[in-house]
Every structure is written in structure tokens, then in C-alpha cells.
């Protein structure tokens, strides 16, 4: 476990802790991901108003962090850590990079760190990510690549208090109702937000399995791209 912590801390802090933005262009992701996201701006309009209200809470938090020259940190929290929180971590990091926020940091954690499902990784791979699996101290750790010459996103199941998660000045984004009920106190958080998603794990081994994974992945991706598109728009106006 000590080896795992040291390895992950080194990888996690390769980037500096400033919250930078590049205003002149979009950054390229892997070609398949670029194709996957190319029409997202049209889908932003389909996000229901009450949902946009919640997503905008993330935008306002990150805008304030930028203005305060603080690192933009989101921790996505779930009950079992086997799917949704990992996908949101990955898509938020990819979206942030795409819109020029090169040092934004995303994390995931949960109440019960279950093994990440194979379908979660396969679904991300279908969207264009490249995943490398390592077993460290008995834990499956995935390095998720999303663009050339960039450090990978590190995903693995872990509890909220894990050393790799930030200890202060972050927003806790809770992605399922059960976690929202049972996570009563989060030390160091700037704010908490419920942004629930349907957990596709509940559809494993059913006729709807692939459909639910693909649907959850797509919804998460669109909403994370919406967040960083709006953030870029707001900051460019200032």
C-alpha cells in the first residue's frame, strides 16, 4: 500500500498546482475522442434547465478558484466507486484540457471502494481513451490516456480520506443519492453538490447492460464538456 501511495502521488503532482487556461484554441484529444465530442455544443441545449443550474454551480466554483489563483479541484464521490465516479473523473479532466484548463485536477472516491467494472473501462475505450491496467498491492489501477504526450489520468477505487485526494479547497460532487445521504461530513470541502447519475452497474448481465453504460458515459461527457465550455466563455468575457 505504501508503494501504491508513493507511485500515485508522483504521477498526480507532475502538473503544477496553478489553474491555467489557454485562450487561443481548443486542445486536441485523441482522434476518436475528438470525433466523439465534436457535436457536443449542439447537445448542450438539450440539458434540462434544472440540470444546467447544478452544473453551473461547478462553473461558478471553478471561476472563483481561477480568480483566486487557486487550483481547481473537483472530487467526485459515489457509494461503491465501481463506475460513475471514475467516468466523471476521466471526462472532466479530458474536457478541462480540451478547453485549455491544463492544470485542473479531478479526483474520485467513495464510501466502499469496490473494484472498477470491466464495462466501465471498455466503455471509455470505445469513446477513444486508452487504458493501461496495473495491479499494485492487490488493487487494479488504471492509467487512462486521452491525448498525446500528457500524463495519464489515474483511476482506482479509494475512500474519501485517501491520501491521494485533496485535503482542502475542493468541491465535492456527489454522483448518487445513496452517497449523498450517507456522506454526512466532508472535511476540507469548499462546497458540496449533488449531481446524480444512473449507475449502469445495476444493469450488469441484463439486456440493457451496454445501452446503459454507453448512455451514462455519453451523458457524463456532454455535461462535463458543458461545464468547461461555460467556464471558458465566462472567463473570456472578463
Image (cartoon, rainbow, N blue to C red):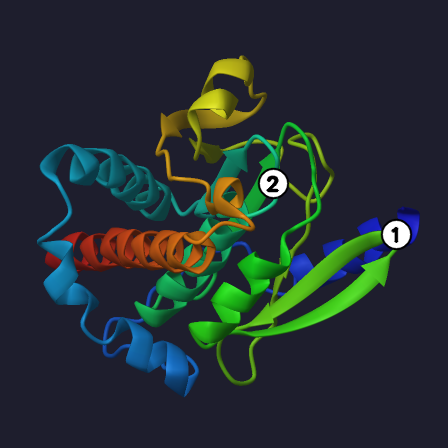
Front residue of 50/227: it is 50
| Quadrant of res 224 | bottom left
Instruction: Give residue 43's quadrant in the image.
Output: bottom left
Is residue 16 at least partly visible in the picture?
A: no
Q: In this view, does 1 lie to the left or right of 201?
A: right
Residue closest to the eye, 68 or 230: 230
- Above or below: residue 25 compared with residue 73: below
Q: Name the residue under label 1.
A: 138
Picture coordinates of residue 44, whole percent (x, y): 15, 56
SS for tag 2?
loop
- From the top left corner, tell me how far across and down residue 10 is, in percent: 75, 60
Tell me the tag on residue 81: 2
Give the spatial CA distance, label 2 vs label 1. 16 Å
Provide the secondary structure element on which disc 1 rests: loop
- Establish if 130 lies above or below 188: below
Point 48% across, 79% down: residue? 147
- Please state the horizontal and vertical placement of residue 125, each as a whole percent of the image: 52, 72
Residue under the point 25% across and 79% down: 25
> Between residues 206 and 114, which one lies in front from this camera angle?
206
Label 2: how many residues lie within 10 Å, few (<14), some (14-19) or many (20+)?
Answer: many
Amino acid at each position: 500500500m505504501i508503494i501504491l501511495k508513493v507511485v500515485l502521488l508522483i504521477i498526480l503532482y507532475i502538473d503544477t498546482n496553478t489553474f491555467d487556461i489557454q485562450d487561443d484554441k481548443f486542445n486536441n484529444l485523441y482522434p476518436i475522442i475528438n470525433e466523439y465530442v465534436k457535436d457536443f455544443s449542439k447537445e448542450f441545449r438539450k440539458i434540462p434547465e434544472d440540470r444546467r443550474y447544478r452544473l453551473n454551480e461547478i462553473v461558478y466554483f471553478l471561476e472563483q478558484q481561477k480568480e483566486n489563483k487557486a487550483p481547481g479541484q473537483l472530487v467526485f464521490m459515489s457509494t461503491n466507486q465501481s463506475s460513475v465516479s471514475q467516468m466523471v473523473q476521466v471526462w472532466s479532466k479530458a474536457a478541462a484540457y480540451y478547453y485549455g484548463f491544463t492544470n485542473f485536477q479531478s479526483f474520485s472516491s467513495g464510501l466502499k471502494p469496490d473494484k472498477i467494472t470491466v464495462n466501465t473501462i471498455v466503455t471509455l475505450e470505445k469513446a477513444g481513451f486508452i487504458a493501461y491496467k496495473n495491479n499494485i498491492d492487490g488493487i487494479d489501477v488504471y492509467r487512462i490516456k486521452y491525448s498525446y504526450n500528457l500524463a495519464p489520468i489515474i483511476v482506482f477505487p479509494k475512500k474519501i480520506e485517501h491520501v491521494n485526494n485533496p485535503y482542502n479547497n475542493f468541491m465535492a460532487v456527489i454522483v448518487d443519492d445513496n452517497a449523498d445521504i450517507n456522506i454526512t461530513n466532508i472535511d476540507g470541502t469548499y462546497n458540496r453538490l449533488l449531481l446524480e447519475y444512473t449507475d449502469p452497474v445495476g444493469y450488469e448481465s441484463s439486456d440493457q447492460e451496454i445501452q446503459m453504460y454507453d448512455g451514462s458515459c455519453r451523458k457524463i461527457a456532454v455535461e462535463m464538456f458543458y461545464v468547461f465550455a461555460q467556464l471558458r466563455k465566462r472567463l473570456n468575457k472578463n
